[in-house]
């Protein structure tokens, strides 16, 4: 599949009916536009260069301060801009409410970064919206950690994820009833009927569970 590296827009004419979209790691978004002579024209944009550091949104990462709002603000800023990467530097980031992942935004944890649940019992650490399937999103790290403490109910609660990636993470603590990753196919359309937009083409890799977990992946 054609890939446009850098931050520039590029027009690519494709005669094939279908286009194979690269994996989430490439962060290439494809938008179809009208073109003459039946040639399907696509605009490809690579947003790898758009990085939103949670420290720039006042996250502290000392394991004491509540960094929920600051991390969510970075995710929302990337989403509003059309997509990008939210960078989490080394540190322990306490969150007390669910972080909502957004389409076209990936949370990338540096080595030594730890997002630690400090909220209510049976809480959900990461979730997604239920209006539309979440696409080309994820949480990836490099020997990074997601700590559930003894209160977390679900580490990742994903609603109809598509082309998403979760990997390079250690899921720590939890309980005998905790769920590591729960994948739901429950997004509904505007009429309220079950949507055909099911979960598909997702990557779960290099995941380590430490401590207790009742169910690793619930599909």
Image (cartoon, rainbow, N blue to C red):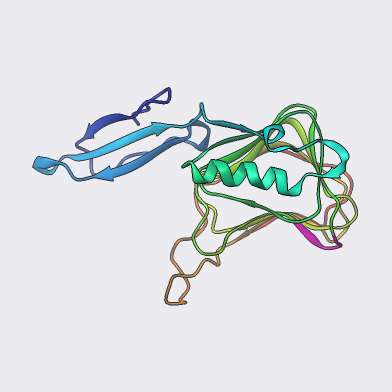
Q: Look at the image and give the residue range highlighted in magenta.
A: 120-124
Tell me where residue 4 sits by quadrant: top left
Where residue 190 sits in the image (x, y, percent)? 43, 72
Q: In this view, does 181 lie to the left or right of 45?
A: right
Q: Which residue is drawn at 54% across and 53% down?
A: 161
Q: Where is residue 156 in the image (x, y as percent from the top left)?
A: 69, 53
The quadrant in which the C terminus is found is: bottom right
Q: What residue sits 53% from the left and 53% below the top?
A: 134
Instruction: Name above or below for residue 119 compared with residue 136.
Output: below
* Residue 2 in the image, given as x and y percentages of width and height: 33, 29
Q: Kindly give the residue lying farthest to the left in the view shown.
A: 37
The N terminus: image quadrant:
top left
Q: In this view, does 36 lie to the left or right of 195?
A: left
> Does residue 203 appear anywhere in the picture?
no
- Res. 40 visible in picture: yes
Identify the residue at horizontal 53%, vertical 32% (top origin): 25
- Indicate the quadrant where residue 165 lies: top right
Relative to 30, say whether 5 is above or below: above
**Depth check: 120 or 69 in front?**
69
Seen as rendered, the residue at the extreme top is 6
Spot occupied by residue 197 in the image (x, y as percentages of width and height): 45, 61
In this rendering, position of residue 65 left or right of residue 4: right
Question: In the image, is residue 71 part of the stretch drawn in magenta?
Answer: no
Magenta span dominant secondary structure: loop
């Amino acid at each position: 599949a054609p890939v446009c590296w850098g931050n520039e827009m590029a027009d690519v004419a494709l005669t094939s009916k279908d286009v194979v979209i690269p994996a989430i790691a490439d962060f290439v978004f494809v938008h179809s536009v009208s073109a003459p002579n039946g040639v399907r024209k696509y605009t490809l944009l690579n947003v790898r260069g758009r990085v939103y550091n949670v420290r720039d949104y006042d996250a502290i990462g000392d394991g004491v301060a509540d960094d929920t709002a600051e991390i969510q603000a970075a995710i929302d800023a990337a989403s509003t801009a059309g997509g990008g990467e939210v960078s989490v530097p080394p540190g322990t980031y306490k969150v007390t409410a669910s972080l909502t992942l957004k389409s076209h935004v990936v949370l990338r944890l540096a080595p030594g970064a730890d997002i630690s649940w400090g909220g209510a019992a049976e809480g959900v650490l990461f979730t997604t919206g239920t209006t539309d399937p979440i696409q080309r999103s994820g949480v990836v790290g490099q020997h990074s950690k997601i700590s559930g403490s003894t209160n977390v109910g679900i580490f990742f609660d994903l609603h109809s994820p598509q082309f998403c990636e979760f990997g390079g993470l250690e899921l720590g603590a939890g309980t005998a009833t905790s769920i590591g990753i729960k994948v739901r196919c429950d997004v509904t359309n505007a009429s309220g009927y079950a949507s055909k937009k099911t979960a598909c083409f997702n990557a779960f890799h290099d995941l380590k569970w430490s401590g207790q977990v009742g169910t690793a992946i619930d599909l």
